[in-house]
Image (cartoon, rainbow, N blue to C red):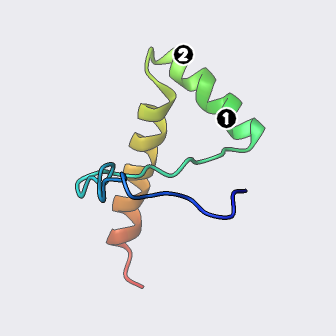
Amino acid sequence: MKEEYDFSKGERGKFYHPDAEFNLPVYLDPDIAEFMRKLAIENDADVEKIVNDWLRKNMEEMQAVPV
């Protein structure tokens, strides 16, 4: 690392985008990932769509149950 860096020609906020979204990666266990891949192939769909649909359905069911 340098002792000193020259930021005199830097531009503040050059890469800042207030509407940018950050998608967190979700890592599935190998058996779950394989199951989802097979299901996606059978339904001619993307794994992301299968997982999102499944999670959305479960969210609805969980919200319907009083805590």
**Tag 1's secondary structure?**
helix
**Is 2 on the left-hand or right-hand side of 43?**
right
Q: Residue furthest left?
A: 19
Q: Position of residue 19 (x, y in %)?
A: 23, 54
**Circle 1 crowding by C-alpha within 10 Å: few under 14, some 14–19, many from 20:** some
Q: Which residue is mark 1?
A: 33
Q: Residue shown at 65%/46% (left/top)? A: 27
Q: Quadrant of residue 64?
A: bottom left
Q: Is residue 40 above or below residue 62?
A: above
Q: Amino acid at mark 2?
A: Ile
**Residue 35 relative to residue 42: left or right:** right
Give the numbered dot on residue 45: none
Q: Please rate how many residues cluster around mark 2, counting C-alpha atoms within 10 Å: few if below 14, some from 14 to 19, many from 20.
A: few
Q: Nearer the viewer, residue 35 or 24?
A: 24
Tell me where residue 28 sits by quadrant.
top right
Q: Earlier in the sequence, mark 1 or mark 2?
A: 1
Q: Secondary structure at mark 2?
A: helix
Residue name at image x 41 percent, y 33 percent: 49
Q: How far separated are the C-alphas under marks 1 and 2?
A: 12 Å
Q: Name which residue lies at 49% across and 40% down.
A: 51
Q: Position of residue 4 (x, y in %)?
A: 61, 63
- What residue sits right under mark 2 in the picture? 41
